[in-house]
Image: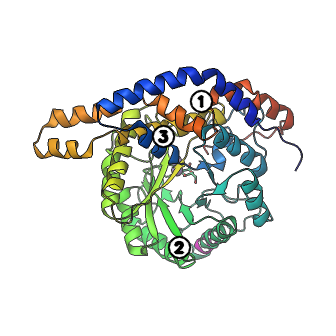
Amino acid sequence: MAYAFRIDDGFVADENRRLAAALDEDYGALGRQLARRGLDIEALTAKVGAFAVAVPTWGVGTGGTRFARFPGPGEPRGIHDKLQDCATIHQLTRATPTVSPHFPWDHVSDWAALREEASSLGLGFDAVNSNTFQDQPGQPLSYKFGSLSHSDRTVRDLAVAHNVACIEAGVALGSRALTVWIADGSNFAGQSNLTAAFDRYLESMHRIYAALPAHWQVFIEHKLYEPGFYSTVVADWGTSLMAAQLLGDKAKCLVDLGHHAPNTNIEMIVARLVRAGKLAGFHFNDSRYGDDDLDSGSIDPFRLFLVFNELVDAAARKAPGFDPAYMIDQSHNVTDPVESLMGSAIELQRSHAQALLVDRAALAALQDDNDALGAHRLLKQAFTTDVSPMLAMARSRAGGAIDPVAVYRAAGYRERKAQERPVTGVVSAGIV
Ligand code: AFD
Ligand code: MN
Ligand code: MN
């Protein structure tokens, strides 16, 4: 493909040099603070550096709402441009080595070539996502009234076939999981038989499950409402867990942080799914009202910390079957998506790092003593510790930027992309 601007690693190193002395000072101070708590900053920094989260290909384009979409300059025009942006996010953060594609949005004719292209950019592929929530041009049947749970078998067949094709594409890309989110539901009481719709969904999922290769998994993504505003076929983690248990070992439940009723205790759902050996992984984002798809940690960082507290706890006690896949799922309507995704990856690392600070044995002792405030204070101490120097040190040691957004801006990446990627004039709406 034609020459595409990339930020020079030498430029990143030069920018880092200007910040290195201050970082050393802050890292040293944090190290001494943690040492007083019996924590070794070097061991923690190594763990933080090992944390990785996938970026969804749809996340690097500007998002929108059902009212409008306001495109930003230099938007990716297709999967090749998207890979460039994903590579830049990983280059500067060193936390996003994989990409999660969405079909048919990211369709290409040669999967092997795409895998090669990604690999040349230092990227691999994470879970593949199917799309039966909208009709594609020329599609013979419509998903207007559902897909995997549709009342018409021929529509269900089409949706199943699409998911099987996604698996085949994923195999060629080196992926190991299929994420299935369906928009199926109803808008009017009486419109749909709630039991029959779920039965049809299960039957379709059994057929998709049967097409999974060895070592593959299917991730079931639930969502409370929207676009069905009366009922949704896979609305909650109870439905998701039931489906995963009925399907078999390869089926697990994916938690998108925006897909719950307001004020739901999501960390408890996480704990339950871990206990059931059914936690597939996450779509990280933040929300205030619904499926807002705001940047991770931007609204309620404490909740994000509490989710990671459960994850670190599960890892520490080696919970059976615990191997969650981490992905960001956000819609960037008013920010530069690359900046938002870099910031979000860092916020996830931050929550992870803070959760690693919790003294598990001390917490268990306080819980056994029913010392409510003592236990809470222990968590709060971890949550209020500024681990920024640790995150920056992990990044810079891995060749990333101490301050990714500042380097990204100084490099003029978006301006260069605006020149390389002329506006196509396509106006679109829709939440990604
Ligand atoms: C929609 C859903 C869900 C899903 C995404 C990609 O709300 O978050 O992960 O589409 O399929 O935004
Ligand atoms: Mn999602
Ligand atoms: Mn969503």
The secondary structure type at the circle numbered 2 is loop
Q: Earlier in the sequence, mark 1 or mark 2?
A: 2
Q: Earlier in the sequence, mark 2 or mark 3?
A: 2
Number of the front mark, 1 or 3: 1
Residue 396 visible somewhere in the drawing: yes
Residue ranking furthest to the right: 2
Quadrant showing the C terminus: top right
Marks 1 and 2, how far apart at CA: 37 Å
Q: Which residue is mark 2?
A: 215
The secondary structure type at the circle numbered 3 is helix
Check the image and report above or below for 78 versus 248. above
Residue stretch rendered in magenta on the structure: 155-159
Residue 149 visible somewhere in the drawing: no
Q: Which residue is mark 1?
A: 402
Left or right: where 219 falls relative to 159: left
Q: Residue placed at 62% from the left, 33% from the top?
A: 333
Q: Which residue is mark 3?
A: 349
Using the rendered view, name the quadrant where residue 71 is placed.
top right
Marks 2 and 3, how far apart at CA: 27 Å
Check the image and report above or below for 207 versus 70. below
What secondary structure prevails in the magenta region? helix
Give the amino acid at mark 2: His
